[in-house]
Image (cartoon, rainbow, N blue to C red):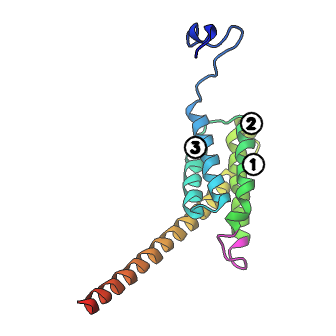
Amino acid sequence: MMNDQELDYNGLPPLGCEASPEPTELEHKIGWLCDCLARVAAGAEQAFNLSEALCSLQTETSRRHARISPTQRDRLLRSLAMAHTSILRLFDASREWPTAAEAVDAVAGLICWWAETDEARDTRHKHLFADFQAYARWLRNTCHNLCLLEDIVRRAGQRRADVIADIIRRTAA
């Protein structure tokens, strides 16, 4: 049953209230990156989700004039911090952890870079951004390689299952 107020609703916000602005493409991108990192933290296809997030982050941060707000930066940094342990668990502790830890720090640096003004960026050494990108690329490539290995193992399992099914089929005939 509808009351009089519901019948008079014209689709506009009540007087004195403003409609929420539509999220921008950049806000959608931030949300998507945070979602990818949340999946990494939750253990869901970690290598794939991290590789996808890093590819997007590297693309976005390569645009010289693109900027995120401090709130967006902090949201991304929180998401990265939540995924940090899960990211390190992808790697061999004795060999790759030091580089992986530096790479995660560099990803945090890229996120901070993304929020900085040109003036702030210009105060940094000219190699810093390149180093951030290189570490992020190392991490992304390593995650991609892990995905390739997972695919190889999955296909090998499928081949074994196919051979076993064929043997069972032949012995039953």
83 above or below 7? below
Residue placed most toward the observer, 27 or 63: 27
Q: Main secondary structure of the magenta part?
A: loop
- Camera-nearest residue between 78 and 116: 78
* Residue 95 within the segment the image draws in magenta: yes
Residue under the image location 62 percent in, 55 percent down? 39
Q: Residue furthest front?
A: 1
Mark 3: give few (<14), some (14-19) or many (20+) Cα within 10 Å: some
Whether 40 is among the magenta residues is no
Q: Which contiguous range is marked in magenta? A: 89-97
Circle 1 residues within 10 Å: few <14, some 14–19, many ≥20: some
Q: Which residue is mark 2?
A: 71
Where is 62 relative to 152, above or below?
A: above
Residue 10 higher or lower than 130, as above or below: above
Alpha carbon of mark 2 to alpha carbon of mark 3: how far?
Answer: 17 Å
Q: Are marks 3 and 1 in contact (CB under 8 Å)?
A: no
What residue would you read off at disc 3? 60
**In terms of sequence position, does the residue under pointer 2 or pointer 3 come before the other?**
3
Q: For the C terminus, which image quadrant?
A: bottom left
Name the kind of residue labelled 3 in the image. Glu
Q: CA distance from mark 1 to mark 2?
A: 11 Å
Please name which of the two marks, 3 or 1, marks the residue nearer to the observer: 1
Residue 78, disc: 1
Q: Is residue 118 visible?
A: yes
